[in-house]
Image: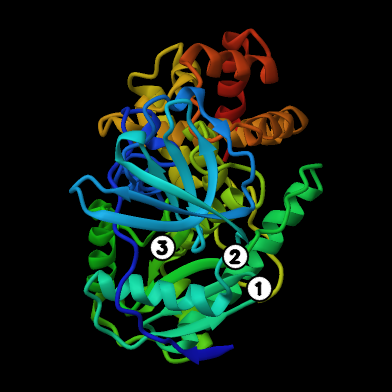
Amino acid sequence: MQRPATPRSSCLSRRQVLRRSCEKFIAGAALGVSPFATYRHSHAQQGSATPPDKISDSQSASSPESLSVVDFRNEAGKQTSVDGRILVRATDGGLLVEDRAGRLWTIPMRHLDGVNSTDRPFQLLTADQLGNTLVSEARSAGIDAEFSVHETDHYVIAASTPHVYSEWTGQLLERMQIAFRSYWKNRHFELHSAPASLPVLILSDQTQFAKMAEFDRTPASAQGQGYFLVTANRVVLFDLTAQDGLVPATNIAEIQRRVQQTPASVATVVHEAVHQIAFNQGMHRRYADNPLWLTEGMAMYFEAPDLQSRRGWSTIGRVNPGRLSRFRDFLKSDRKATSIETLVQDNSRFADPEQAIDAYAEAWALTYFLIRTQARKYVDYLKTVAQKQPLVWDTPAERLSEFQAAFGSDVAELDRDFLNFTDRLK
């Protein structure tokens, strides 16, 4: 379905980055370091208000389905109001609020002016409203282009591209979603349906894409082909067929021909789509303490695109040559005997530009090893992580203990099995 987009004049104000160096990578990763698809810092709390002061003691709100009007001042002191549902009330009075567009707002007590509860139920935006919001955000980023909105079974896609490219992307995303859900259902992890259509913004070229990345306070994402912004819950992409000065493709066959020449670029679309599905269908929870090795490893495990079929998806779990090659280079250089421990106990390696590429590669390799050799334990671990509450951070020791409870206390033995396994991969 295609319809003209109704322009809107404004969108909710941007939010500041969440504090604490590791926690602000709740669902994110190091910028611009991955050779293929990367999960950008934008998934971290770009554009959010400063978090509640005592987030480790946060508790779920008592009536998350009622609509509240929250008045607060942003970092610049400007009066702001958000209509949404309160997901978390921290012990210091700070709030985590989800608005009707699915954005998350962290509002500290010192910025809070008032909360007015209503007896109206909280409802996410309709597909039409969400599409208009996507266009409004793009216009607020300074993108002066003609947009249309394309709706599929599970997505709302606002695009400044030719409709055929939006249609092709929608087909790819729908196939990916079916494959992802089926894969985990067969392994006894039943995902639930997303509460609303998932938002996707597709821009016509890298110039527009860079403007949007700047607006989302993740400028380094402009060096890639896409990103998932966890605060706004949306994926941002651009027309891959318009690269290198080419005229955009005008039919599906031409799109297929061009993207097959750059499968690594399409891997970004798949990678970001996996993040969005996982964070909306019960595998991960936004603003919870999701280990980056897990979220990134998951997306990399699925990122190989299937560009041959219009229906099925046969590439799930294919060995990723680029990740494997990088991991083997890492083994030859300075990989420590405690590498698994440092990978799982916090996100610091992903935040360090000098270590991030190797952290990504090892996250893919460890995920591949665990899914292929210890699938039941891996699924149990996924279910444990899925229960984590927003804005509650585990200590490094707690993270490691949780990992050991799932995969065994002898991490050194696990590491030996891991290295033997990856040595045999081709």
Q: Where in the figure is residue 54, as x and y percent of width and height?
A: 41, 24
Task: Name the residue that disc number 1 marks.
Answer: 309
Q: How is the image coloured?
A: rainbow
Residue 353: quadrant of the picture:
top left
Q: For residue 403, which numbered disc appears in the image? A: none
Q: Where in the figure is residue 135, as x and y percent of width and height?
A: 38, 77
Q: Where in the figure is residue 289, as x and y percent of width and height?
A: 51, 31
Distance (Cα) linking label 2 and label 1: 7 Å
What's under tag 1, amino acid-wise?
Ser
Left of 260 or right of it: where is 185? right
Residue 50: quadrant of the picture:
top left
Quadrant including the C terminus = top right
Q: Tell me the SS state at disc 3.
A: helix
Task: Name the residue that disc number 3 marks.
Answer: 265
In the rendered view, tell whether residue 399 sits above or below residue 13.
Answer: above
Determine the residue positioned at 41% across, 88% down.
162
What's under tag 2, amino acid-wise?
Asp
Sequence-first disc among 3 and 2: 3
Task: Name the residue that disc number 2 marks.
Answer: 306
Sequence-first disc among 1 and 3: 3
Left of 249 or right of it: where is 253? right
Left of 162 or right of it: where is 174? right
